[in-house]
Each structure stands twice: as structure tokens, then as C-alpha cells.
Amino acid sequence: MKISCHVIRDLLPLYAEDMASQDTRDLVEEHIVYCENCKKQLEEMRTVEAPPVDTDIAPLRNIQQTLRRKKLQTILFSVMVTLVLAVVTIAYLTTPAYIPYNEDAVSIIEKDDGTVLLNFSEEVAGYNVTEYPKEDDSGSVYDITTWETIWDQNISQSNLENTVLNPNGETVDAIYYYNTDGSEDTLIYGDSVTDGSVVTLPRLVLSYYLLFAIAFSLICGIGWILFRKNEKIRSGLEKVILLPISYVLAHFLIKGLHPSTYLAGRDVYLILLVAISLYFALLAGRNILKKSLKSA
């Protein structure tokens, strides 16, 4: 029985790949003996070169760099979050618990050479002294307060040494001990410099910083809404707005709902330290989230 070329050509790929049965091979071989066209097609199948191997590793390098960048961002996020938790914990443990005035907490020692010493009891973990000149510039007036902390009460007790109030020989006219509950300051040394009572109030500087950060966040938010279709501007605003947001979050982590402070320097330092750590954590988290959404 004569087999047509169409049937043989259907069998040629199996024959060329050595995947045909012996009967099929015999059939093909018998046909190509007298059919030059099928024989030529078989030879062409056997001489087809294998496709060249793609040696371009640029895509692989891009994948490796992306994975490495994502890993570094994840590490940065974890480190910054850990730092935030550490600073907030330390801030909590060292938060001043102000001590109402009593003679055991602090006493005044006046030496023969005119120097005045502050002598603190064991319960005092820290103190603050503010100096300002008397109205007639005849001497200086000092406001002091003391505090204890959870750290000193439960972890590490530190004893304060006697402190010289006027190391440069300044004239000490009066020393007031101020409480932080809004009550009248207590004169503990010298003569009163006013006819009435004196009350030391907390500073509100942190409130101004907080309001500025909130206002800046709102401005950036409005800008983001207006330019949300411009990817470059939108991306820049997203990075900028994280700065005031980080400060606001840091403020509430350190001060809670109480913006007033008697130790502005300490509180600002801690808030900035937490805010910087939060900013880099939020920035890394933003990048990780954007890449996750793109790959989803």
C-alpha cells in the first residue's frame, strides 16, 4: 500500500527525534528511498540548530538588586522600630516625678567663702536650676526643683553630690523651690524679691511645635490632593509629609496629651530622637508596601 507524502511528513518529526516505533521507522525509510522531497525535509529537520542560549544576566541582576534593596529596607524598618521602642521605654523610665518641697529633699549649705551648696537626699534622682538677675542687678535669684524616676526607684539608684550654686562667686539673693502643681513657690534661702507670691509656670513651647507640625501635615496633605495625578510631585509630598507626621506621633509617645513642660530641652531632644527614627521606619515601610502592591 502506497503511503502519501502528507502522511510521511506527519511522521518525520517523530522519526527525526527517534521517538517513532520500528514499524513507523521502516515505513518512513521505505518512502524516502524514492521520494527526494520527503528525504530533503528530513535532512533539514536534522540540521536545524538549537536556539542560542541567552547569556544576558542583566534581568537577573535587577531581580537580585530589588531583593537586596527590599531586604535592606526591611532591616532598616525593624531597626528603627526597635530604636523607637527603646527610646520611648527609656523616656518612660526616666520621666521626672517631681518632689514637693521638703527640707529632707534639698537643703542649703552656705560656706565661709560665700559659695552656696545644694545638698540632696537619696530620693532625689535629678534637679533643675534656673538663674536670673535681681531687678536691681545686685545679685541673682535661683529657682530649683527636684524629682525622682522609676529608673532610680527600681533599677539603678544614683546619689547626687553636693552642687555649688554660685561657682563664680555670684551673689545669691534668694533661692525659690518651685512645685509643678501650680502652687506657690517656696522661699528656702535669702529674702523675698517680690511683695507677693511667686508661681513658676510650665513652658508651652512644645505646643507651638506640635501645632506647627500639624499645620505642615495639613498643607502637605492638601498639596498631595491637588497634585495626586503627578507621580513625581505626589511621591515627593508623600516623603515630606512623613516628617511632620513622625513629629506628631513622637510628641504623643513622649508627652501624651500634656504639651506643657518644665524640662523643654529634655523633652524636645527625646521627641526629635523618636521622630527621626519614626520617619525612617515609616519611609522604609512605605517603600515595602508600594513594592508589595506592585507585585500583587
Image (cartoon, rainbow, N blue to C red):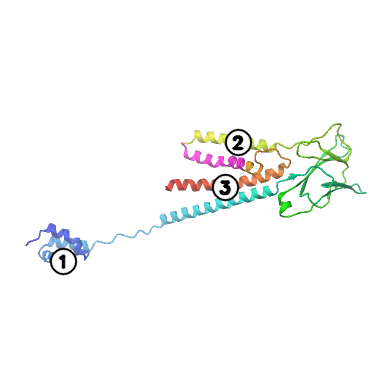
Q: Nearer the viewer, mark 1 or mark 2?
A: 2
> Which residue matches tag 1?
25
The residue carrying pointer 1 sits among few (fewer than 14), some (14 to 19) or many (20 or more) residues within 10 Å by Cα, namely some
Question: Upstream in the sequence, badge 1 or badge 2?
Answer: 1
Residue 143 shown in magenta: no
Q: In the image, residue 100 lies at what x, y percent?
A: 79, 42
- State which region is magenta: 229-249
The residue carrying pointer 2 sits among few (fewer than 14), some (14 to 19) or many (20 or more) residues within 10 Å by Cα, namely some
SS of the residue at dot 3?
A: helix
- Asked whether 244 or 53 is in front, the reply is 244
- Asked whether 96 or 35 is in front, the reply is 96
When the figure is inspected, residue 198 is found, relative to residue 44, above or below; the finding is above
> Which residue matches tag 3?
280
SS of the residue at dot 1?
A: helix
Residue 231 shown in magenta: yes
The numbered dot on residue 184 is: none
Query: Quick check: marks 1 and 2 in contact, CB under 8 Å?
Result: no
Q: In the image, residue 212 lies at what x, y percent?
A: 63, 35
Q: Residue furthest left?
A: 1
Q: In which quarter of the image is residue 32?
A: bottom left
Dot 3 amino acid type: Phe
The numbered dot on residue 214 is: 2
Q: How far apart are marks 3 and 2 (CA)?
A: 19 Å
